[in-house]
Amino acid sequence: MFALVCFSINLYICRKPCEHDRARLSATENNPVSFHVSASSPGGVTLLPPCTDQRTDTCPYVVSPLLPSISDLHSFSILTLSLCHSPSLPVLTSRFLPDYISGDFDSITAEVKAFYADKGCRLMETADQDLTDYTKCLAIMLEEIRTQKLQVDTIVTLGGLAGRLDQTMASVETLFHALSMTQLPVLIIQEASLAYLLKPGNHRLRVNTGLEGEWCSLIPVGGPCQTITTGLKWNLNDQVLQFGKLVSTSNTYEPTAPGKPRKPVTVTTDQPLLWSMGILIDGK
Amino acid sequence: MNEEWTPLDCLLPSGKQRICLIILNQPLDKNHLHVLWSKALLRACADGAANQLYNITAGDRDKFLPDYISGDFDSITAEVKAFYADKGCRLMETADQDLTDYTKCLAIMLEEIRTQKLQVDTIVTLGGLAGRLDQTMASVETLFHALSMTQLPVLIIQEASLAYLLKPGNHRLRVNTGLEGEWCSLIPVGGPCQTITTGLKWNLNDQVLQFGKLVSTSNTYEPTAPGKPRKPVTVTTDQPLLWSMGILIDGK
């Protein structure tokens, strides 16, 4: 079970139409089975009028292949989402009501705020200037999990790794904070990248879902890390990873005999170490 | 360095800095490319960057021929490679697996500057801060290597972000070109930095910047009275510290 936090920036969602969509939407008769999400509007993310272009190379999608189906999510929140006017959209968006929207509300538009408030989503203004919207949203998520006594394995964050460089770095900073906020793994996914901060100790990562891209990487963002790995093409043999000396980027998985599954990747580190990996999008 | 330095001078058509240009394999901003290309004394592509250049200069390719293309050539397409080879651009295969195409391209650039005895103020890199997260981090790693490769400032620009690694010591950054975006940032990638700043809205007062404790993101410039120019930003750091700032695109 996991909880989902969404960022507003540069978020692309475009599902391939499935039979459920066609059946449900045939009544509304606007053929909106897929839609582009664009970051071009001020306020954050806009759902553009549904595209009729079904080619997947113009509709990159991140969310769909990774989530079994939206209805399986136990709870999720969306930080900022603005909607264009489209008669068909309410059919889709009524399935996407966040449990809460939090932040200092300097990005959400009045229209979007009113829409979600009207639908009963909680709006939680968090004015703390020293913490980012992401950190505050995560804090609320953890509190909700506690209050509702939910059994959760992972907190997944959508967005946060592209756009302004300082915001990418701020997302990584939130992962650092998360290490002292919760035992739950907190990971970030955007487009074809996943980021996960390994706390000091031993880790064993299964990389056999079939969704793994070619590359992976160990990045000592906060400082030097004494590192041992197995399962990578270029392993670290009790070496120090450190900016200016050695950073492991464009690494990949240890090759396996045809038909054999990949071995897990093991990582031992003495300091928090950022693991990053590619996600297959459209099989590439 | 103690003198004032203007990070965005390179994007000002009237800017005074003499620059060399390295292009990395990312979608190119046409405006940035045109301004930088026209000012650059040397221009180079790292591997697949040649594909980007080839595509974006369609119809005008002869005006945008790089001095050299370097890398392990696993990204450049055969068609693009043949095109530029045919036009006399040098193709320099650099097979070193331990260094990235960017680092190798920078090394060649520095060698060319030396050999040709060029007077250069700044090396500008286009691309490298978006796409795969590990490649963004690899670009930052190249900036670290650059500190020991050259005294010249090496900076990276992609879309609306600029990144520049401040070496230990004092820095004075002019932020008055009119091209500065709203935000700026000091990011202690690589380890803790004892930091003092002036000229920012939220200054560091001899504080330690460190992931997990304090990172300065979404900062901005000290407000000034209407009509008055911004004061320079000064930064003192004891370790390499990544400065990042927004660039105005189309006035926003």
Image (spheres, coloured by chain):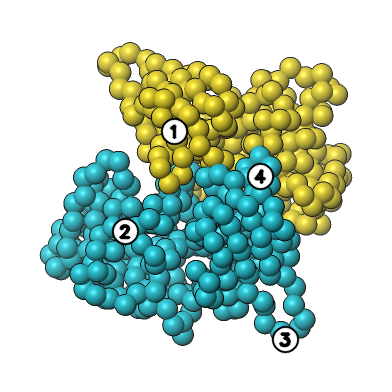
Chain colours: A yellow, B cyan
Same chain, marks 2 and 3? yes
N-terminal label among 4 and 1: 4
Callout 2–callout 4 Cβ contact below 8 Å: no
Q: CA distance from mark 4 to mark 1?
A: 33 Å
Identify the secondary structure beneath mark 3.
loop
Callout 2–callout 3 Cβ contact below 8 Å: no
Q: Which mark is residue B112?
A: none
In the image, taking residue B244 as reference, residue B147 lies left or right, namely: left
Q: Residue at x 24, y 75 (%)?
A: B117
Residue type beneath disc 1: Val
Q: Residue at x 85, y 39 (%)?
A: A122
Q: CA distance from mark 2 to mark 4?
A: 35 Å
Identify the secondary structure beneath mark 2.
helix
In the image, taking residue B57 as reference, residue A187 lies left or right, namely: right
- The x, y position of residue B222, in whole percent, is 72, 70
- The x, y position of residue B164, in whole percent, is 50, 61
Same chain, marks 3 and 4? no
Q: Nearer the viewer, residue A60 or B141?
A: B141
The residue singled out by tag 2 in the image is B106
In the image, taking residue A56 as reference, residue B103 lies left or right, namely: left
Residue type beneath disc 3: Gly
**Residue A166 visible in image:** no
The residue singled out by tag 3 in the image is B227
Give the quarter of the image for residue A271: top right
- The x, y position of residue A37, in whole percent, is 59, 49
Q: Residue at x 69, y 23 (%)?
A: A183
Residue type beneath disc 4: Phe
Same chain, marks 4 and 1? yes
Q: CA distance from mark 2 to mark 3?
A: 40 Å
The residue singled out by tag 4 in the image is A7
- For mark 4, name the chain: A
N-terminal label among 2 and 3: 2
